Amino acid sequence: MENKNTEAKKKKDKPKVGKKKLEEKTADKDKTKSSKTTQNKGETHSDKTKKDEPKTNSNITMANKRSRNSRGDGKKQEQSQKKTKECGFIKQNVISDLENNTDFKIYFSQGELHTKGVITLVKKDFECTNHYFNSNILKGRLVHTRFKTDDTVLNLLNIYSPTKSTGQQGIFYREMMEYCASVNVESHRNIMLGDFNCIDQQIDTKNPNIVLDNTIILLYKELCTMFNILDSYRYKYPKKISYTFIGNKGAKTRIDKICISEALKHKIRDLKHIPYQYSDHKIVYISLKLQKTKRGNGYWKMNDSLLDKELYIEYINNFWINWKQRKSNYNILDWWEIGKKRIKELTIRFSKKLVARQRKELSETYIQLENEENKTQPDQVTIDNL
């Protein structure tokens, strides 16, 4: 009887080691989660310092880009006693900070699922308005902005179509037609860009034997006909084979497009697909030359980043050493003013050569990437053989 009581007492007094270890493990996990959140936040703020090259109101340059990490995960986290909704690189509570520290206004449509999310950035010197809608189908799949440049009103419709497997692709295209009709889109010039998730020609897929979805193709063509827009890439390059999406199983398609009004097709300055290392989609880039804006003389401002280049410093130092030796040939004020003007001229010349070299290197890099991509695919089938 005593032995049984003693054993029961030992079991009761036995320390709960398992529970303690579990608590320590949970605490460590929370610390790790906190550090990852802080790290991601730091990465977001580091992106704010990037600025694009300035462009005049007579030119419209657009790039459609999708990232693997840009999808919202729909999770909520508690941070500094404030709830924020995760959406990849951009959180709702930092959009205002990004706008204050960049030259862009940001229009963002976030979906409730990780497979949704569209964002449009517009330079602040454009007069622009954002259009809102109540459709749950379009939420997270459309950003509609309307802006003016010179005497032109442009509708920019940034879309992300569902895939066929969701069963909502046909509904999405019908909703798009109803929405565009409701806001009188056809009365203006239009640009519709994004991931259409639609292949309407065999040339736009690596597999020439693929069965195209005629139902979706008809809806896509009806949308284009209704609002008088065309596929800008296929207009400019009728027989060129180029893919914008490369899947992890080797699938290659051109599902990312920029469709423009018929009235804009003769204003295309540049159009290309640019490889993007952080995504399985390429950047789809277009530059449009609109009506020329009358401009004054303006003023020159030096690019401060040149001061970090040793070659530029050496270039200016060599000039200044020689220029000081000629001081006795001028009145001191004239010598100083002429010297400043010469430095400006040398700086402009240096900058032009630097930009030309960078563009050449970038172009060569694009060509190398395309050549490497073509090495991994079988003999290409041209449109003439389909």
Image (tube, rainbow, N blue to C red):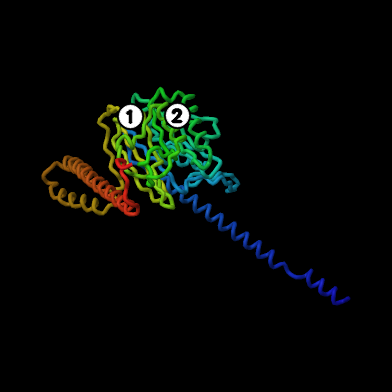
Q: Is 265 left or right of 28, judged from the image as shown?
A: left
Q: How far, Cα to Cα, is label 2 from label 1?
A: 21 Å
Residue 163 lies, in percent from the top left, at 49, 41
Towards the viewer: 66 or 102: 66
Structural crowding at the residue carrying mark 2, measured as other residues with C-alpha within 10 Å and reported as few (<14), some (14–19) or many (≥20): few
Q: Is 138 left or right of 251, judged from the image as shown?
A: right
Residue farthest to the right? Answer: 1
Residue 125 lies, in percent from the top left, at 38, 32
* Tag 1 residue: 264
Towards the viewer: 40 or 80: 40
- Number of labelled discs? 2
Which quadrant would residue 2 be assigned to in this image? Answer: bottom right
Helix, strand or loop under label 1 = helix
Residue 286 lies, in percent from the top left, at 34, 37
Quarter of the image with the C terminus is top left
Type of amino acid at the residue the image marks with label 2:
Thr
Which quadrant would residue 235 be assigned to in this image? Answer: top left
Residue 263 lies, in percent from the top left, at 33, 26
Type of amino acid at the residue the image marks with label 1:
Leu
Which residue corresponds to the image point at 66% horizontal and 61% vertical from the top-left? Answer: 23
Instruction: For residue 127, say whether it is visible.
Output: no
Quarter of the image with the N terminus is bottom right
Structural crowding at the residue carrying mark 1, measured as other residues with C-alpha within 10 Å and reported as few (<14), some (14–19) or many (≥20): some
Which residue corresponds to the image point at 45% horizontal and 32% vertical from the top-left? Answer: 219
Residue farthest to the left? Answer: 329
In this rendering, the answer to whether 110 lies above or below 31 is: above
In this rendering, the answer to whether 172 lies above or below 381 is: above
Q: Which mark is residue 129?
A: 2
Say which label, 2 or 1, has the lower sequence index: 2
